[in-house]
Image (tube, rainbow, N blue to C red):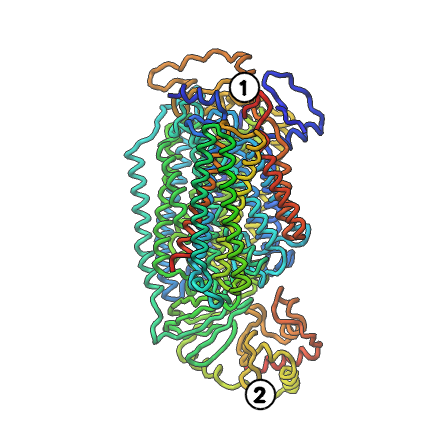
Amino acid sequence: MATQAAFMPGAKVETLTFWGTVASWLTTVDHKRIGILYGSSAFIFFLVGGIEALIMRLQLARPDNTLVGAERFNELFTMHGTTMIFLAVMPLSAAFFNYMIPLMIGARDVAFPRLNALSYWIFLSGALFLNSSWLFGLAPDGGWFGYANLTTSQFSPRHTIDFWMFGLQILGISSMLAGFNFLVTIINMRAPGMTLMRMPVFIWMSFVTQFLLVLAFPAITVALILLMFDRFFGTLFYAPAAGADPLLWQHLFWIFGHPEVYILILPAMGIVSEVLPTFARKPLFGAPVVIYSGIMIGFFGFGVWSHHMFSVGMGPVADAAFSVSTMLIAVPTGVKILNWIGTLWGGSIRFRTPLYFALGFIAMFTMGGLSGIMHASPPVDLQQTDSYFVVAHFHYVLFGGSIFGLFGGIYYWWPKITGKMLDERLGLWHFWLMMIGFNVTFFPQHYLGLIGMPRRIYTYAGDLGWNFWNLVSTIGAFLIAVSLLFFIVNAFRSLRSGAVASNDPWDGRTLEWAIPSPPPVYNFARVPLVQDRDDFWLQKYGDGHGAAPRPKPAPVTAAEIAAIHMPSASHWPIVLAIALAVMISGLLISMYQVIVGGLATLYLMYKFAVELHRPPAGHGH
Amino acid sequence: MADHAVAHAVHDPNIGNTGLDNRKMGMWAFLGSDCMFFGSLIGTYLAYKGKSISGPLPHQVFDIPLTSYSAALLLASSLTMVLALAALQRNRVKVAARWLFVTALMGAHFVLNQVYEFTTFVLHDGLTLSTSLFGSTFFVLTGFHGAHVTGGVIWLLILVGLAMRGQLDARDYTKVEIAGLYWHFVDIVWIAIFTIIYLIP
Amino acid sequence: MTPRPKRLDWMLVGLLGAVLVLTSSCSWVGWNWDTPMSTVVPKSDFGRMTHEIFMLISWWTLGIFIVVEVGLLYVCWRFRDRPGAPIPKQVHGHTALEVSWTIAFAVILLVFAIPTIRVIFKTQEAPAATDLRVDVFGKQWWWEFRYPKYKITTANELHLPVGQTAAFFLNAPDVIHSFWMPQLGGKRDVVPHRVNHITLTPEVPGEYPGQCAEYCGMSHANMRFHVIVHTQADFDTWVKAQQAPPVEPTDPLAQQGKTIFTQSTCVGCHSITGISAGHIGPDLTHFASRKKFAGSLMESTPENLAKWIENPEHMKPGALMPNLGMTGDQSKALAAYLLSLK
């Protein structure tokens, strides 16, 4: 396997064969390629989760329907939730972390490129492992939140829960490794002059997200380990008969689960905070406040978890405490919306597809946030939790919020990543159909919840007044599906024959627009020296206080480029990820597989660690 | 200012613009995460303390002298770890290797003590994973700590092996330093576990 | 840059706005709020207290919604790009404004927090000795109700007297469920290894469906129950009827059914006072006094009952009642017996 650089700056580029190309992608450590891998995988799983949703909506379109039975429906809502959260939104955010963080901080790659690749391959193996359950007729059916003690062996004797449990553990390892990587990258690899407060807001939101990832995932790791031990080794962590409290699971899960929702929304907020200033041609209004709000949300996000548990009977003191903390955290979350509107105020707003999605984010996230405030009041929440009202709430923030924001990012950074432009007209069709379809799907669900429709039910009686709006909701879901067709067509057409993108098609403000589209493997020929926030904008236009734009620097020389050294490709990440998957899936097959896989994993960890220990002369990295 | 940091970056790709080493920072991030991991396990232990409905009680099975000795072992091994690093810094590779080996031995001794303790509980005291909440929480918490120590021992032995093959010297100070950080963390977690589980009634 | 159709945008904005306005307005008229499981037409004190806070928050959030969304649309229209426009003034923020709107928002939340905390404590007061105690057992996938004061055990139908405070003691013998009667108030989970409480006073006689609201396995969707709030007189009548010994069947088919019942494994799971004492399935002593069965899933008709007895799992996925291999005739006889137990 090639361990030399597949691309040396300045050297002649060899044309790779098909298998050579495949090999180069399987062994890449380039953050840009890893970002593309995350993004493409995430989009495919987004479609998978979407199909799961469409089947559920078809089943719920009519009362007492028999399209799918109880078992299948329970599997569908479990997999839909798990897929959308862990295999769609998170990796789509990771795609942007990977591609954009080094570019926006003026770095050439992340702190640990091989670890970065390892994160991706572990993610993919976890995603495939989880979805392989469909092939075995053992798709998880405990809900995406897997409440004990329903998920213990006594009440879930089949391996369905084990696929979910191990799948999440694998995915958790991937997320945590990436978290360590981006934390170090953001702290330690910023270009000279880029102080923390000069970092783009997307970087700040991503930074807070990484802290949440590394500090929240251990809680669910422990919850899952305890469940695994109960199911496999007879421990009693979730066994009420032995004196255990099933609420232990809920506490551990939601100590992870609440920071998780901020992990899901902060990157999209970061994207919106980049798109709005670019298309309004004004800086983000109150950027420091938006940054501090993000930090506060991250910090206080660890103090609200039991608002998911208002109905379990924690007692009035706990209920009141978590109600207050939840309302408190609504403050930094809510004022950001006003900062975003303030950004648009006084601007010169150019309406392009990325901006539409950012505007859609603001409009939909506001609605989701407002229904969230209702949930913050326990008496009110006791009517709303576990009903379609909360289903409406979280789809407004996760779809109307995160997904719209992430699509905004896709349209915004597509020219930078691919070097091609997406078609505006197709983009607008996508946006408007998705906007209308989304609201037709989920707005009526507020009503359904308020008239008593519980969630996670595969069917319902026809005499409760739920029939009509369930049908409407189903029609909306198919509208969303149609809207995605416009995006897919747009994407293919762009890649094949789209208009060529310049370095800076949107007249942007941040460093990534200063380099070619797509960037060369080394990103920056010369490491930038940053003097302010929105440094690139200031280079172009000056600071608006009369000072002239900065003098253009001398052109980059070939010698400078030849001196750049990029990390070499490596096959250890994908091999190690496979060994890890073999070991963990062995827990469902045979102890021998676990032992062999485990030994292989240990050995490969060693090989991974020493690969660069005493590299040949000339390679210091 | 910025130029100073740039100069560093040109020399050593592991040193960032803050002057700190990426790998050390990565290890600190990992240890922060691991704190939450052990915190959740300790929290679980405390949530279930006193709630077992059958089986031997902690004070009936704990061998405090033995576990105190184990705690002292780990503490001493942190000292030998520091000595190893000091030697490596002065490029005294063989001395460093010896101290690393002693550290690993003490860690292995700790794990063996733990195996002995677990075996005694299972065979003599009738305390297993599935006996009671105490059995479940105790074995899982201390077992995962023991697994962390084992991982550390393997890591240290690999470093010893590299040193003996002439593939470790003062240039690798940071790599050994992060092994040291990990080792001290595992030691501190044991202090916490020892105090909360064994000492506090 | 690719050109984009200007007028189409504004047409679409107008279209979306029109759709939203139309839907919202005819929803006010066309969305029926007084449905069987509605949460916004409260029939108890607990429901009312909850509803007051809900309405308070709803009006404020509607106001915030209008301000924000209209503000957003206005800003987009007013500050749209015009050809040849200069780069706008690079405003970085306005500290006084940002502080003000932060404080304003916090104050609004305080307005929600105060009644919230008051109602939390009011609705979780300990039950009084004069309350009617009902022990609720949520089992996969049906509900058992016991009235210790009257020594009654019944299933899936909860009878309450209007105007008297009912104190529910919630138990979960298997997994976590949630006890929810939307028209009478919010839900409370039933959690293994603990007894939860919910206390409320029904204020309007009527019939109110309830349903389990915490995913509890295969037939979670089928774990329903029915609440009947009586006048005090009717409630007393019901209590007396439930306390009476089981009716002796006079119909020959029903008598046949009773014989089959007493000779089958039915007696291991079900109780009929004086005849069997099984505690796994529902108490059948006054089965026919209830309109539905199997977790309030199906009407208690001879056909439904016979089909259920022949193959429970077929009627209700995952049903824990085993298939006892009853023939068609046996099932019909048993059904007749059950329907005689008024």
Give the residue at mark 1.
Answer: A564
Give the residue at mark 2.
Answer: C248
Q: Which chain is indicated by disc 1?
A: A
* Amino acid found under the numbered disc labelled 2: Glu
Mark 1 crowdedness (10 Å alpha carbons): few <14, some 14-19, many ≥20: some
Q: Quadrant of the C terminus of chain C?
A: bottom right
Residue A148 point in image, percent of width and height? 52, 59
Q: Is residue C46 left or right of residue A474?
A: left
Identify the image quadrant of residue B18.
top left
Residue A420 point in image, percent of width and height? 58, 25
* Amino acid found under the numbered disc labelled 1: Ile
For the point 51% across and 59% down, the residue is B136
Residue A418 point in image, percent of width and height? 58, 26
Relative to A68, residue A521 above or below? above
Q: Which chain is indicated by disc 2?
A: C
Residue A462 in view in this figure: no
Relative to A45, residue C164 above or below? below
Q: Nearer the viewer, residue A139 or A46?
A: A139
Residue contact between numbered discs 1 and 2, judged by CB atoms under 8 Å = no
Residue C95 point in image, percent of width and height? 30, 33
As helix, strand or loop, the secondary structure at mark 2 comes to loop
Q: Nearer the viewer, residue B104 or A467?
A: B104
Q: Is residue B51 left or right of residue A459?
A: left
For the point 39% across and 52% down, the residue is A376
Relative to B27, residue A149 above or below? below
Q: Nearer the viewer, residue C220 or B104?
A: B104
